[in-house]
């Protein structure tokens, strides 16, 4: 999965999850992310990703299967592989769906 697909899918699922939780909370008189002010508030979704890049070269005949090998040789062919891992950290501000009922309108227990 590419980083852009992962970020887009994650944020879409978070927003969809909040919306579903709001519908479920309504059934029990609860509120998820109620409108506390007249202004839109933003939340930050923090991502901390481990990104790996693999480079592989193959020469010669057939390549054998090798797991976690830096260099594998089979039948006159060779393969070398290098892996570089980096951490990628960033925050994305999002406005979560506001519950349609404000706190002032919510029923009190």
Image (tube, helix red, strand yellow):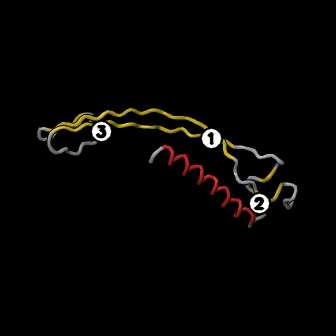
Secondary element at image label 1: strand
Q: Is residue 74 left or right of residue 83?
A: left
Q: Which residue is rendered at x = 14% and y = 43% of the image?
A: 61
Q: Is residue 58 left or right of residue 39?
A: left
Residue 63 image label: none
Q: Is residue 95 left or right of residue 89?
A: right
Q: Which residue is rendered at x = 23% and y = 34% of the image?
A: 71
On the image, the x and y values in percent for residue 99 come to: 76, 57
Sequence-first tag of 3 and 2:
2
Sequence-first tag of 1 and 2:
2
Q: Nearer the viewer, residue 4 or 81?
A: 4
CA separation, marks 1 and 2? 27 Å
- Neighbour class for label 2 at 10 Å: few (<14), some, many (≥20)? some
Reading the image, the residue beneath label 2 is 30
Reading the image, the residue beneath label 3 is 68
- In the image, which is nearer the foreground, mark 1 or mark 3? 1
Secondary element at image label 3: loop
């Amino acid at each position: 999965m590419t980083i852009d697909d992962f970020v887009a899918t994650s944020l879409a699922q978070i927003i969809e999850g909040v919306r579903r939780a709001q519908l479920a909370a309504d059934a029990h008189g609860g509120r998820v992310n109620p409108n506390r002010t007249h202004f839109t508030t933003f939340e930050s979704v923090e991502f901390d990703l481990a990104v790996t890049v693999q480079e592989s070269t193959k020469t010669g005949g057939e390549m054998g299967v090798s797991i976690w090998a830096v260099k594998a040789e089979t039948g006159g062919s060779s393969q070398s592989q290098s892996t570089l891992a980096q951490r990628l950290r960033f925050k994305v501000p999002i406005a979560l769906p506001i519950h349609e009922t404000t706190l002032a309108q919510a029923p009190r227990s």
